[in-house]
Image (tube, rainbow, N blue to C red):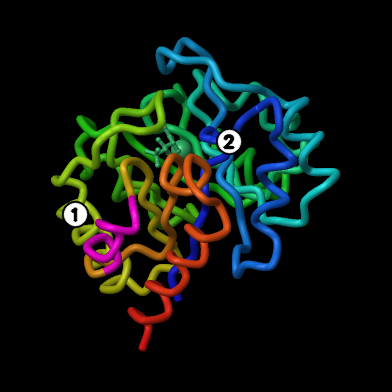
Amino acid sequence: MVELSPSILSCNFSNLQKDLDKTTGTDLKMIHIDVMDGIFVPNISFGFKVIKDIRDKNDYFFDTHAMIVEPIKYIEEFKNSGVDRLTIHYEACENLDQTIDKIKDNDMEAGLTFKPATDINLIIPYLEKIDLVLVMSVEPGFGGQTFMEDSIEKIKILRAYIDENNLDVKIQVDGGIKTTNVEKVIDAGVDEIVSGSDVFGKDIKEQINKYYEIFKQKSL
Ligand SMILES: O=C(CO)[C@H](O)[C@H](O)COP(=O)(O)O
Ligand SMILES: [Fe+2]
């Protein structure tokens, strides 16, 4: 079944744990943690201290999306903060193979993502060595943007390649997903859905339950 990874970027940071507490009693298994450095993307979110502090209070799988230049420099810190999977940007790494290897050496799952304008054919060769490929369906940097329709085709290409080659790689989509458009990305073949403003910007528990209702219907 498809899983939801709600982005805490849309939480109220003055009440972060209060927002996370509202997810209890749902089917949720992971949360999406967007780290931005103000250089790779034109926005700054939060860093290791925040991740560490919520790690102490939440058992969720920490699905972390690093929108930072040269994440290789910070891999140990992500690990020490309690990150379970580190997804890095193709465009942000001078040596991508080395960066992926270092994530795995630090006992985290490795995810790879790419900006909407990046040619998907540049990503395909790395599918053999990663655990997750993330299709960005908005320009990275901000929550609350509109879903880019051409992401559907990218998901379909990745789904076909992964299935044809029997690869053990999950497909995630991030940006502009709502309960009203989630079905089409599921139909295209995603395994995980990131949603920020449509979860933490609304009635949190109700929205998570709505997503899981849709996922269950789709898996019948
Ligand atoms: O990576 C991101 C932005 O760069 C966020 O994960 C994403 O935008 C989620 O927010 P929303 O669902 O509101 O689009
Ligand atoms: Fe993200």
Which residue occupies 57% across, 39% down? 8
Queried on whether the Cβ of the residue with tag 1 lies below 8 angstroms from ligand 1, the answer reads: no
Q: Secondary structure at mark 2?
A: loop
Any mark on residue 152, and which?
A: 1
Q: Is residue 87 above or below residue 132?
A: above
Which residue occupies 24% across, 42% down? 147
Residue 49 location, quadrant: top right
Residue annotated with mark 2: 11
Range of residues picked out in magenta? 178-186
Q: Nearer the viewer, mark 1 or mark 2?
A: 2
Q: Is residue 182 rendered magenta in the image?
A: yes
Image coordinates of residue 163 in percent, x first then y, are 30, 73
Q: Quadrant of the N terminus?
A: bottom left
Q: Secondary structure at mark 1?
A: helix
Any mark on residue 115, and which?
A: none
Q: Amino acid at mark 1?
A: Ile
Crowding at dot 1, Cα within 10 Å, few <14 / some 14-19 / many 20+, comes out as many
For the residue pair 50 and 120, the one nearer the viewer reads as: 50
Q: Quadrant of the C terminus?
A: bottom left
Q: Is residue 69 above or below residue 174?
A: above
Residue 105 location, quadrant: top right
Q: CA distance from mark 1 to mark 2?
A: 27 Å
Which residue occupies 25% across, 64% down? 161
Q: Is residue 40 rendered magenta in the image?
A: no
Residue 16 relative to residue 160: left or right: right
Residue 23 relative to residue 172: left or right: right
